[in-house]
Amino acid sequence: MFSQFLGHYLVQNDLITTEQFSSCMDYIRQNRVKLGLIAETEGLLTRAQANELNQLQMQTDKRFGDLAVEKGYLTETDVKYLLGRQGNPYLIFVQALEENNFLTRDEINDAIQNFKTANGLTDEIVQAIQNGDIEKMLPAFVDVDDDKYIALIGLTLRNIVRFVSSYIRIEKGSFTSSLSARYIVYQHTTGDFDGFLGFTCDDDSILTIAENFGKEKFAKVDEDALDSVCEFTNCVNGLYATELSYQDITIDMLPPEFYFDDTIKDKGDFFVLPLYINGSKTNLIVKLT
């Protein structure tokens, strides 16, 4: 997830090109991060120790972790922990930038600090994004007094990561009373509190949800494609209704709806969260009363 946030910042500020960012994303899909980088990031090794172990690996047929234990730099428990962190997409992204000679480690660290400052993010929020901790990062993007919004938006994003793509990025959202779009999908809920959940889009970006959730290719955004997005919306609302039932809160779901070239209005204020999936923008829309 952080690769999307930082990658967008790097491209927008001409620190890397769009092609270089795409190359990094291909690298992430094909590689796992090296233990040395994880250990250094976690503060378990110094850069000098990591470099020493990398050199030793070139001289002997031993794994990095085994060499680190032999040198007394890490324990077996440390190595086990690092192996569990080896699939971290953020660290793989850093590795991709370095190994492709797009940016040095110092340039990456500077960029992260500038990204944090430019977006007014705290260290805790940046750490949450790096770890893919949606609940902890959401308050920086969803400024609402009602915790129900955080709960439903968090649930939706987790299921996008689960069923659609883990390469997502969000921007700060806001309330509006009207929104026009080329494609609109939403589902109303009624009961102990009313509202709706859905998506809007002005191009074919919404196909990312339709195709990845439906496991089907669509030639264009048509009724079948939007119906697949409806099914995803229904899936999320179903999970939400189940979670609420544990709190003795009951909501019922109405059939999902979709519209072409229309406007959402006369429904009171609702929250719009800009959402980028694989780099393509779709708005997540939520209303809860």
Image: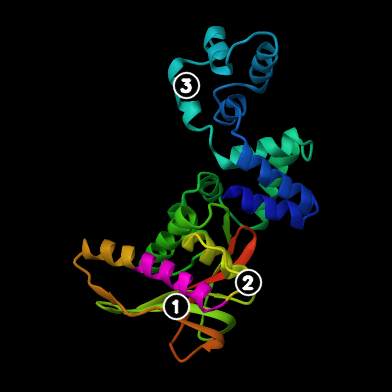
Q: Earlier in the sequence, mark 3 or mark 2?
A: 3
Q: Nearer the viewer, residue 229 or 45?
A: 229
Compared with 54, 212 (above or below) is: below
Density class for disc 2 (Cα within 10 Å; few <14, some 14-19, many ≥20) is: some
Q: Nearer the viewer, residue 199 or 68?
A: 199
Amino acid carrying label 3: it is Asp
Coordinates of residue 49 in the picture (x, y in percent): 64, 17
Residue 78: mark: 3
Compared with 14, 24 (above or below) is: above
Q: Residue at x 78, y 40 (%)?
A: 102
Q: Residue at x 41, y 69 (%)?
A: 231
Give the residue at mark 2.
204
The magenta span reads 222-237
Amino acid carrying label 2: it is Asp
Q: Quadrant of residue 109?
A: top right
Whether residue 223 appears in magenta in the rendering, the answer is: yes
Q: Is residue 163 left or right of residue 8?
A: left
Amino acid carrying label 1: it is Tyr
Coordinates of residue 213 in the picture (x, y in percent): 47, 61
Residue 164 seen anywhere in this rendered image of the structure: yes
Residue 186: mark: 1
